[in-house]
Image (cartoon, rainbow, N blue to C red):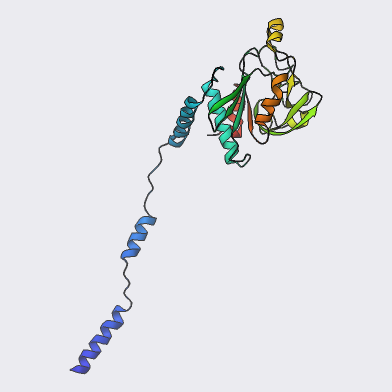
Protein backbone atom coordinates (compact mmCIF):
# COMPACT_ATOMS: atom_id res chain seq x y z
CA UNK A 1 0.00 0.00 0.00
CA UNK A 2 2.83 2.36 0.91
CA UNK A 3 4.46 1.69 -2.48
CA UNK A 4 1.16 2.46 -4.22
CA UNK A 5 0.78 5.80 -2.41
CA UNK A 6 4.36 6.79 -3.29
CA UNK A 7 3.76 5.90 -6.94
CA UNK A 8 0.58 8.00 -7.11
CA UNK A 9 2.32 10.96 -5.44
CA UNK A 10 5.23 10.82 -7.86
CA UNK A 11 2.82 10.77 -10.82
CA UNK A 12 0.97 13.86 -9.51
CA UNK A 13 4.18 15.83 -9.00
CA UNK A 14 5.43 14.88 -12.47
CA UNK A 15 2.22 15.91 -14.25
CA UNK A 16 1.79 19.21 -12.39
CA UNK A 17 5.42 20.27 -12.78
CA UNK A 18 4.55 21.40 -16.34
CA UNK A 19 1.62 23.54 -15.18
CA UNK A 20 2.17 27.33 -15.51
CA UNK A 21 -0.07 30.00 -13.99
CA UNK A 22 -1.35 31.87 -17.03
CA UNK A 23 -3.24 34.54 -15.17
CA UNK A 24 -0.39 37.03 -15.59
CA UNK A 25 -0.24 36.17 -19.29
CA UNK A 26 -3.91 36.99 -19.63
CA UNK A 27 -3.40 40.34 -17.95
CA UNK A 28 -0.33 41.16 -20.08
CA UNK A 29 -2.11 40.10 -23.27
CA UNK A 30 -5.12 42.21 -22.46
CA UNK A 31 -2.87 45.25 -21.93
CA UNK A 32 -0.91 44.66 -25.12
CA UNK A 33 -4.04 44.16 -27.17
CA UNK A 34 -6.03 46.96 -25.62
CA UNK A 35 -7.16 49.71 -28.00
CA UNK A 36 -5.95 53.20 -26.96
CA UNK A 37 -8.54 55.91 -26.62
CA UNK A 38 -8.53 57.86 -29.85
CA UNK A 39 -7.58 61.54 -29.63
CA UNK A 40 -10.15 63.98 -30.83
CA UNK A 41 -8.98 65.29 -34.23
CA UNK A 42 -7.43 68.74 -33.87
CA UNK A 43 -7.69 68.71 -30.06
CA UNK A 44 -3.97 69.29 -29.45
CA UNK A 45 -3.88 72.03 -32.07
CA UNK A 46 -6.87 73.75 -30.53
CA UNK A 47 -5.27 73.52 -27.08
CA UNK A 48 -2.01 75.05 -28.35
CA UNK A 49 -3.88 77.86 -30.08
CA UNK A 50 -5.93 78.48 -26.96
CA UNK A 51 -2.79 78.62 -24.79
CA UNK A 52 -1.16 81.11 -27.18
CA UNK A 53 -4.32 83.21 -27.24
CA UNK A 54 -4.38 83.26 -23.45
CA UNK A 55 -0.71 84.26 -23.44
CA UNK A 56 -1.47 87.16 -25.78
CA UNK A 57 -3.97 88.50 -23.23
CA UNK A 58 -1.22 88.67 -20.60
CA UNK A 59 1.23 90.71 -22.72
CA UNK A 60 1.74 94.20 -21.32
CA UNK A 61 1.75 96.54 -24.34
CA UNK A 62 2.10 99.56 -22.09
CA UNK A 63 1.37 102.89 -23.76
CA UNK A 64 2.31 101.60 -27.22
CA UNK A 65 0.07 100.25 -29.96
CA UNK A 66 -1.29 96.74 -29.53
CA UNK A 67 -0.11 94.09 -31.94
CA UNK A 68 -2.75 92.26 -33.94
CA UNK A 69 -3.55 89.00 -32.16
CA UNK A 70 -3.29 86.86 -35.30
CA UNK A 71 0.18 88.25 -36.00
CA UNK A 72 1.27 87.46 -32.45
CA UNK A 73 -0.07 83.90 -32.66
CA UNK A 74 1.94 83.24 -35.82
CA UNK A 75 5.05 84.85 -34.37
CA UNK A 76 4.73 82.80 -31.19
CA UNK A 77 4.18 79.57 -33.15
CA UNK A 78 7.38 80.13 -35.12
CA UNK A 79 9.27 81.13 -31.98
CA UNK A 80 8.16 77.90 -30.27
CA UNK A 81 8.92 75.70 -33.31
CA UNK A 82 12.41 77.16 -33.68
CA UNK A 83 13.06 76.35 -30.04
CA UNK A 84 11.71 72.82 -30.38
CA UNK A 85 13.87 72.27 -33.46
CA UNK A 86 16.99 73.20 -31.49
CA UNK A 87 17.62 76.35 -33.53
CA UNK A 88 17.44 78.42 -30.36
CA UNK A 89 18.41 77.95 -26.75
CA UNK A 90 15.36 77.26 -24.62
CA UNK A 91 16.42 80.24 -22.52
CA UNK A 92 15.98 82.60 -25.51
CA UNK A 93 13.34 84.99 -24.24
CA UNK A 94 13.10 87.89 -26.71
CA UNK A 95 10.63 87.89 -29.59
CA UNK A 96 10.74 90.76 -32.11
CA UNK A 97 7.93 91.24 -34.62
CA UNK A 98 7.71 93.60 -37.61
CA UNK A 99 4.17 93.74 -38.99
CA UNK A 100 4.70 94.80 -42.60
CA UNK A 101 0.99 94.66 -43.33
CA UNK A 102 0.77 98.06 -41.60
CA UNK A 103 1.59 101.53 -42.90
CA UNK A 104 5.22 102.54 -42.44
CA UNK A 105 3.91 105.60 -40.58
CA UNK A 106 2.77 103.29 -37.76
CA UNK A 107 4.94 101.91 -34.99
CA UNK A 108 4.93 98.39 -36.40
CA UNK A 109 7.93 96.88 -34.60
CA UNK A 110 7.50 95.22 -31.20
CA UNK A 111 10.23 93.79 -28.99
CA UNK A 112 8.68 91.49 -26.39
CA UNK A 113 10.33 90.02 -23.30
CA UNK A 114 8.57 86.65 -23.20
CA UNK A 115 9.66 85.99 -19.62
CA UNK A 116 8.18 89.16 -18.14
CA UNK A 117 5.45 89.26 -20.86
CA UNK A 118 6.21 92.91 -21.47
CA UNK A 119 6.77 94.98 -24.62
CA UNK A 120 10.17 96.64 -24.34
CA UNK A 121 10.03 98.64 -27.59
CA UNK A 122 7.26 99.63 -29.99
CA UNK A 123 8.83 101.68 -32.78
CA UNK A 124 8.93 102.63 -36.45
CA UNK A 125 10.75 100.24 -38.81
CA UNK A 126 11.60 100.59 -42.49
CA UNK A 127 11.00 98.23 -45.38
CA UNK A 128 13.02 98.04 -48.61
CA UNK A 129 13.02 100.73 -51.30
CA UNK A 130 11.57 98.35 -53.90
CA UNK A 131 9.15 96.77 -51.46
CA UNK A 132 6.75 99.68 -51.60
CA UNK A 133 6.04 103.31 -50.73
CA UNK A 134 3.99 103.81 -47.56
CA UNK A 135 2.94 100.16 -47.56
CA UNK A 136 5.03 97.05 -48.20
CA UNK A 137 3.75 95.09 -51.20
CA UNK A 138 6.69 93.29 -52.83
CA UNK A 139 9.20 90.96 -51.24
CA UNK A 140 12.29 89.18 -52.50
CA UNK A 141 15.06 86.83 -51.45
CA UNK A 142 17.29 87.97 -54.32
CA UNK A 143 20.53 89.90 -53.98
CA UNK A 144 20.44 93.54 -55.14
CA UNK A 145 16.62 93.53 -55.28
CA UNK A 146 16.45 96.27 -52.61
CA UNK A 147 13.40 94.46 -51.26
CA UNK A 148 12.56 93.18 -47.81
CA UNK A 149 12.26 89.45 -47.09
CA UNK A 150 9.40 88.08 -45.01
CA UNK A 151 9.79 85.27 -42.52
CA UNK A 152 11.66 84.21 -39.41
CA UNK A 153 15.20 85.27 -38.58
CA UNK A 154 17.61 84.44 -35.80
CA UNK A 155 19.59 87.41 -34.53
CA UNK A 156 23.37 87.06 -34.57
CA UNK A 157 26.34 89.21 -33.59
CA UNK A 158 26.84 92.96 -33.95
CA UNK A 159 29.36 95.05 -35.89
CA UNK A 160 30.04 98.66 -36.86
CA UNK A 161 29.63 99.25 -40.59
CA UNK A 162 28.69 101.97 -43.05
CA UNK A 163 25.31 102.31 -41.32
CA UNK A 164 26.82 102.39 -37.85
CA UNK A 165 26.00 99.87 -35.16
CA UNK A 166 24.34 96.91 -36.92
CA UNK A 167 22.99 93.43 -36.19
CA UNK A 168 23.50 90.39 -38.42
CA UNK A 169 20.41 88.32 -39.20
CA UNK A 170 20.16 84.69 -40.29
CA UNK A 171 17.09 83.95 -42.44
CA UNK A 172 15.41 80.67 -41.47
CA UNK A 173 12.77 80.36 -44.21
CA UNK A 174 14.08 78.60 -47.30
CA UNK A 175 13.28 80.44 -50.48
CA UNK A 176 11.99 83.48 -48.61
CA UNK A 177 14.82 84.93 -46.53
CA UNK A 178 17.64 82.39 -46.38
CA UNK A 179 19.82 84.66 -48.56
CA UNK A 180 19.61 87.46 -45.98
CA UNK A 181 23.14 86.97 -44.65
CA UNK A 182 24.62 86.91 -48.16
CA UNK A 183 22.56 89.99 -49.08
CA UNK A 184 23.80 91.81 -45.94
CA UNK A 185 20.23 92.23 -44.68
CA UNK A 186 20.82 93.52 -41.15
CA UNK A 187 19.18 95.72 -38.55
CA UNK A 188 20.73 99.18 -38.36
CA UNK A 189 19.87 102.76 -37.55
CA UNK A 190 18.92 105.41 -40.11
CA UNK A 191 18.18 109.13 -40.00
CA UNK A 192 15.20 108.70 -42.34
CA UNK A 193 13.24 106.83 -39.67
CA UNK A 194 11.56 109.75 -37.95
CA UNK A 195 8.29 111.59 -37.40
CA UNK A 196 9.71 114.58 -39.28
CA UNK A 197 10.27 112.42 -42.37
CA UNK A 198 6.68 111.20 -42.11
CA UNK A 199 5.38 114.78 -42.01
CA UNK A 200 7.36 115.64 -45.13
CA UNK A 201 6.80 112.46 -47.18
CA UNK A 202 3.72 110.78 -45.66
CA UNK A 203 5.91 107.72 -45.03
CA UNK A 204 9.23 106.94 -43.42
CA UNK A 205 12.34 106.48 -45.51
CA UNK A 206 13.17 103.12 -47.04
CA UNK A 207 16.22 100.90 -46.77
CA UNK A 208 17.88 98.55 -49.25
CA UNK A 209 15.90 95.69 -47.69
CA UNK A 210 17.00 95.99 -44.07
CA UNK A 211 14.59 96.40 -41.13
CA UNK A 212 16.10 99.78 -40.21
CA UNK A 213 15.11 101.68 -37.06
CA UNK A 214 15.62 105.23 -35.80
CA UNK A 215 19.29 106.12 -35.38
CA UNK A 216 18.98 106.91 -31.67
CA UNK A 217 17.19 103.61 -30.99
CA UNK A 218 19.48 101.31 -32.95
CA UNK A 219 21.90 100.56 -30.15
CA UNK A 220 19.38 99.91 -27.34
CA UNK A 221 17.14 97.78 -29.59
CA UNK A 222 20.01 95.80 -31.10
CA UNK A 223 21.61 95.17 -27.71
CA UNK A 224 18.26 93.84 -26.45
CA UNK A 225 17.56 91.41 -29.30
CA UNK A 226 21.07 90.29 -30.33
CA UNK A 227 22.53 86.85 -29.62
CA UNK A 228 20.22 84.06 -30.78
CA UNK A 229 16.74 85.49 -30.47
CA UNK A 230 13.83 85.55 -32.97
CA UNK A 231 12.83 88.33 -35.34
CA UNK A 232 9.71 87.78 -37.45
CA UNK A 233 8.86 89.93 -40.46
CA UNK A 234 5.15 89.35 -41.00
CA UNK A 235 3.21 89.86 -44.22
CA UNK A 236 -0.12 88.12 -44.98
CA UNK A 237 1.17 86.17 -47.97
CA UNK A 238 -0.90 82.98 -48.12
CA UNK A 239 1.69 80.99 -50.03
CA UNK A 240 4.32 81.78 -47.42
CA UNK A 241 1.97 81.03 -44.55
CA UNK A 242 1.20 77.58 -45.95
CA UNK A 243 4.79 76.68 -46.83
CA UNK A 244 6.87 77.93 -43.88
CA UNK A 245 8.03 74.98 -41.81
CA UNK A 246 7.97 77.21 -38.74
CA UNK A 247 4.25 77.86 -39.04
CA UNK A 248 3.26 74.19 -38.92
CA UNK A 249 1.05 73.55 -35.90
Q: Residue at x 68, y 26 (%)?
A: 220
> Which percent across, then down, holds residue 138?
69, 18
Query: For this rendering, which residue is in front, 161 or 35?
Result: 161
- The answer to whether any part of residue 177 appears in the image is yes
Q: Is residue 200 above or below residue 190?
A: above
> Which percent across, then down, holds residue 64?
56, 17
Q: Residue furthest top?
A: 200
Q: Is residue 44 above or below residue 12?
A: above
> Which percent across, then down, holds residue 146?
76, 20
Looking at the rendered image, the quarter that the N terminus falls into is bottom left
Quarter occupied by residue 240: top right
Query: For this rendering, which residue is in front, 82 or 118?
Result: 118
> Which percent across, then down, holds residue 7?
25, 90
Query: For this rendering, which residue is in front, 152 or 21?
Result: 152
Q: Is residue 229 left or right of residue 74?
A: right
Q: Residue at x 63, y 32 (%)?
A: 230
Q: Residue at x 32, y 79 (%)?
A: 17
Q: Is residue 223 above or below residue 1?
A: above
- The answer to whether any part of residue 209 appears in the image is no
Amino acid sequence: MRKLILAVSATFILTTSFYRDTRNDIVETSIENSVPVAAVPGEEEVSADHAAAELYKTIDFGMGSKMNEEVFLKAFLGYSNLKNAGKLEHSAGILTVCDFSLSSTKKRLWVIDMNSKKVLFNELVAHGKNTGEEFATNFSNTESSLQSSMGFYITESTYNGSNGYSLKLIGMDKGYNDNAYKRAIVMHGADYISENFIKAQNRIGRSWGCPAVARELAEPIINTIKGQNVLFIYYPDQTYMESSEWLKA
